[in-house]
Amino acid sequence: MKDRMTEQVALAYLNGNLLAPYGRATRLEIHSADRRLRIEVELRGETAPLEVEIGGYDISCEGERYFIGVKEVRTSREWLTAMARDQFGKGPLEVPASAGRWLMKLLR
C-alpha cells in the first residue's frame, strides 16, 4: 500500500519537475522491501518508451549532500545500460539536495 501511494506522488514529482523538459514517466513501480524500482518514460524524439530497472538502490545523506547508490541497472537501451553501469560502478552518485531530500522521504 505504501509503495503504491509513493508511486503516485513520485510520478507527479518526476513529471512536474525532473522530466518535464525531456518527456514524461508513464509508469513507476516501487518495491521498497527489495529496494527495487522500475520506470517507463516516454522521451521526446524517441519512438519507443525507455524502460529502466534498478535493483539494490541506497539513498544516503552526509550533512547537506545526498547520494544514490545502485547495485544493478538495466534499461531498454543497450548503450544506456552500459553507461549507467559504468557510472554507478564508480560508487554512489551525488544528487541535488532538493531531489535527495525527496528521495529520502519516499524511498526509505
Image (spheres, rainbow, N blue to C red):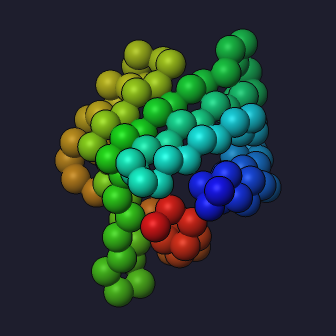
Residue 86, how many percent across, how many down? 26, 35
Height in image: 63 above or below 107?
A: below
Q: Quadrant of residue 63?
A: bottom left
From the viewer's perspective, tell me whether residue 35 is left or right of residue 44: left
Residue 19, how many percent across, how many down? 69, 46
35 and 81: which one is in front?
35
Height in image: 79 above or below 30?
A: above
- Residue at 34% x, 59% y is 58
> In the displayed image of the protein, which residue is found farthest to the front?
1
- Residue at 74% x, 53% y is 8
> In the displayed image of the protein, which residue is found farthest to the top?
47
Residue 54 can be seen, yes or no: yes
Q: Quadrant of residue 10?
A: bottom right
> In the displayed image of the protein, which residue is found farthest to the bottom?
63
Height in image: 107 above or below 35?
A: below
Residue 34, how many percent across, how many down? 38, 48
Height in image: 67 above or below 23?
A: below
From the viewer's perspective, tell me whether residue 11 is left or right of residue 66: right
| Numbered-mark total | 0
- Residue at 60% x, 41% y is 29
* Quadrant of the frame with the N terminus: bottom right
From the viewer's perspective, tell me whether residue 94 is left or right of residue 4: left
> In the displayed image of the protein, which residue is found farthest to the left?
90
Residue 22 can be seen, yes or no: no
- Residue at 22% x, 42% y is 89
33 and 50: which one is in front?
33
